[in-house]
């Protein structure tokens, strides 16, 4: 999917919502256990309930890998069920060098046909560039994440006073353009978004941390918008686990609709 196509989806739906398909087997409604593949059935119903309200879906690979071969089967069926106009993100946080990175890239871009994959930049350029060699595919680089431990290293000041995450963002723009590279910037750091936008004015930002982690959508949007929106704001638990009964999909839709309506208003400003 191109940057222009993603912009068009945002405009047409009045939404920059990404729904995180973190299908924790221990939390999915118990009545789904009667199905041969409860995880897929959970995802299928969530997708059906939210597809008109969001522009992207982001399965976190840990919830599927933990289930072994069954989990991979659930993931493949889930991907096949997501409508083609949606942007799909493999939240895999891979990062290795040489042939290993190339094989990870093939796994997510060719075998599974995701649009994007999250990548950890710690090992440097040769751990990232193998993912950038696929037409129409995206790298979403971890820059300033939403977890509490993000301050352990990402905010560390370098000799020039620049935080490490800023160095990562500036250097990464030498490797890939705004048409193939996004950055993860957590909603729990709203005070950093103005600086992030000065560093990367054109790049899309994937923003976790809205909902269960307490991020402020208004603050993120106010400081993080560029001329074309430029945000994909993810909500996982706050939507998919909004209910745990037989009406879980309806509850998920209501939660997603609340976010989408707020986004539609913000996009008008």
Image (spheres, helix red, strand yellow):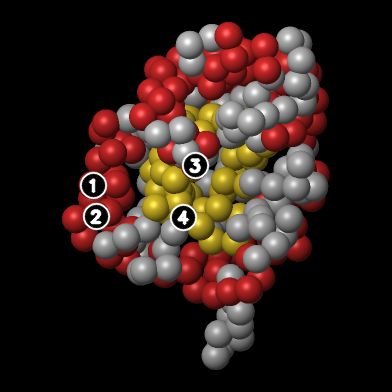
Instruction: Identify the residue at the far bottom of this view.
Output: 159
Q: Earlier in the sequence, mark 2 or mark 3?
A: 3
Considering the image in quadrants, where does the C terminus appear? top right
Considering the image in quadrants, where does the N terminus appear? top left
What residue would you read off at disc 3? 62
Percent x, y of residue 201: 55, 56
Q: CA distance from mark 1 to mark 3?
A: 18 Å
Decide: few, some or many residues near mark 3? Use Cα within 10 Å; few <14, some 14-19, many ≥20. Answer: some
Q: CA distance from mark 1 to mark 4?
A: 18 Å
Q: CA distance from mark 2 to mark 3?
A: 19 Å
Q: CA distance from mark 1 to mark 2?
A: 5 Å
What residue would you read off at disc 4? 141
What residue would you read off at disc 1? 103
Indicate the quadrant where residue 17 lies. Answer: top right
* Residue mark closest to the camera, 1 vs 3: 3
Decide: few, some or many residues near mark 2? Use Cα within 10 Å; few <14, some 14-19, many ≥20. Answer: some
Disc 1 element: helix
Percent x, y of residue 104: 29, 46
What residue would you read off at disc 2? 100
Disc 4 element: strand
Q: Earlier in the sequence, mark 4 or mark 3?
A: 3
Taking the image as shown, residue 139 lies to the left or right of residue 239, namely left
Q: Earlier in the sequence, mark 4 or mark 2?
A: 2
Q: Earlier in the sequence, mark 1 or mark 4?
A: 1
Disc 3 element: helix
Q: Badges 1 and 2: C-beta atoms under 8 Å apart?
A: yes
Q: CA distance from mark 4 to mark 3?
A: 18 Å
Q: Which residue lies at the image location 67% right of the left edge and 12% below the top edge?
A: 31
């Amino acid at each position: 999917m191109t940057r222009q196509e993603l912009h068009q989806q945002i405009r047409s739906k009045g939404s920059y919502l990404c729904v995180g398909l973190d299908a924790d087997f221990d939390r999915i409604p118990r009545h789904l256990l009667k199905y041969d593949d409860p995880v897929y059935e959970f995802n299928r119903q969530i997708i059906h309930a939210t597809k008109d309200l969001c522009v992207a879906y982001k399965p976190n690979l840990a919830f599927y890998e933990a289930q072994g071969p069954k989990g991979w089967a659930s993931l493949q069926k889930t991907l096949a069920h997501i409508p083609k106009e949606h942007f799909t993100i493999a939240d895999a946080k891979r990062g290795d060098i040489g042939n290993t990175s190339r094989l990870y890239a093939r796994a997510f871009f060719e075998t599974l046909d995701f649009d994007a994959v999250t990548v950890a930049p710690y090992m440097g350029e040769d751990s990232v560039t193998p993912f950038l060699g696929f037409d129409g595919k995206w790298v979403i680089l971890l820059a300033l994440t939403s977890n509490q431990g993000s301050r352990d290293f990402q905010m560390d000041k370098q000799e020039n006073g620049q935080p490490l995450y800023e160095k990562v963002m500036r250097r990464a723009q030498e490797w890939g353009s705004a048409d193939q590279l996004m950055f993860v910037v957590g909603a729990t750091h709203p005070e950093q978004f103005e600086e992030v936008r000065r560093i990367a004015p054109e790049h899309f930002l994937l923003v976790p941390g809205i909902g269960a982690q307490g991020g402020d959508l208004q603050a993120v949007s106010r400081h993080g918008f560029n001329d074309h929106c430029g945000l994909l704001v993810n909500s996982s638990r706050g939507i998919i686990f909004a209910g745990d009964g037989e009406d879980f999909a309806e509850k998920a839709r209501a939660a997603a609709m609340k976010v989408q309506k707020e986004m539609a208003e913000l996009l008008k400003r």
